[in-house]
Image: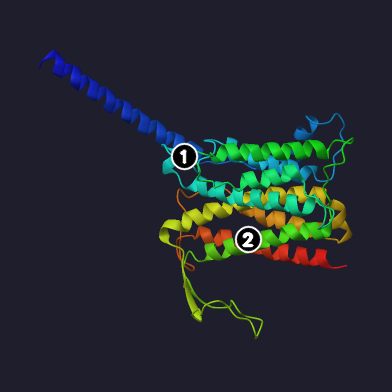
Amino acid sequence: MSEARQGRFGWLRGIFWLAIVYLVASVFLGVWWSWGASEFDVNTATEERLSLLTDTDQTYTGSYTTATLIELGDILLSKPGGFLSNDMTPPGIWLDNQPNWEYGMLIQIRDMSKALREAFSRSQSQSTEDQQLARAESRFNVDHNNWIMPAAEDEYKKGIAALEDYLARLVDADSTNAQFYARSDNLRYWLRTVETRLGSLSQRLSASVGQRRLNTDLAGENEASQSTAAPKELEVKTSFWERDDVFYEARGSTFAILHLMKAIEKDFGSVLDKKNARVSVQQIIRELEGTQEFVWSPMILNGKGFGFVANHSLVMASYISRANAALIDLRELLAQG
């Protein structure tokens, strides 16, 4: 064999082994990145952020909620593997569980950013909105699949920076241009959004086994109408390829709501005590903690009825449904005089 031919085969062998090493490394990275983020202590995270902004040990109304939202944003971008939803190369492009987890958490970050802008930071409907909170909400609403012009991570970083600016002004005793109003009507505004999110997730998770449901879209009002006719019975079933996607989206959403509820308990403590509603918040937190338990199975199982194989989606739906029921009770309790 000529030296030129030997050199060509050597070059091809080098490329082959380099590809093998790359694929093996990608597999190991993919497994590591799929572990996701761990729960954090809301009190510790808030105290650490406040220690960088003020020399006093005093906590300010709204500081827990804002600091927790910032921490969730940091986790979204800095967990193992970073932000994976818009990855265009292996192993990120092969993964789908973590991107769905990210999307679920991102939805809750968007909802809380909106609540901060429209309710928590405003004394009344005619008051002026905080410009940094408006900036944060718009940045978090950038499509999570964008990888360039603009890249989603870059926009989310700008949103986090805007929240950090708001928090700095919030804890500045000499500044009055940033406020957080802990009122029951403001809290109900956010809880109503969470209620609809959890209700949707519960229905999508329950549809993993497929079932026929009566159409209740117009139930409760004789004169109600809708744009186009719909069948009286509906066949609802989540596609086989989407069951684990819905599961991890729900897991990401409940991860964010769990920590935000812990922050709400701190910032709205006096409001909750006045309504004797603190125990309701604690019950919601307990149910949400169940959604974050370790998944021992290497894949999301989809057993039916009382069969031999578990159905992880239905277990998740059970926790979410109970949390949502407690959340509805809490919102009604806060509405009472």
* Front in this rendered view, residue 104 or 248: 104
Residue in the image at 27% along x and 28% along y = 16
Question: Given the image, on which type of amino acid does mark 2 rest?
Answer: Leu
Residue 87 badge: 1
Q: Secondary structure at mark 1?
A: loop
Q: Is residue 61 visible?
A: yes
Mark 2 crowd level (few <14, some 14–19, many ≥20, 10 Å Cα): many
Left or right for 177, reference 32: right
Q: Which residue is mark 2?
A: 198
Q: Position of residue 137 (x, y in %)?
A: 67, 47
Mark 1 and mark 2 residues within 8 Å of each other at the beta carbon:
no
Q: Is residue 292 visible?
A: no
Work out which quarter of the rendered image holds the N terminus and state it.
top left
* Front in this rendered view, residue 317 or 225: 225
Q: Secondary structure at mark 2?
A: helix
Left or right for 145, reference 129: left
Residue in the image at 24% along x and 21% along y = 11
Q: Position of residue 82 (x, y in %)?
A: 54, 36
- Above or below residue 184? Residue 10 is above
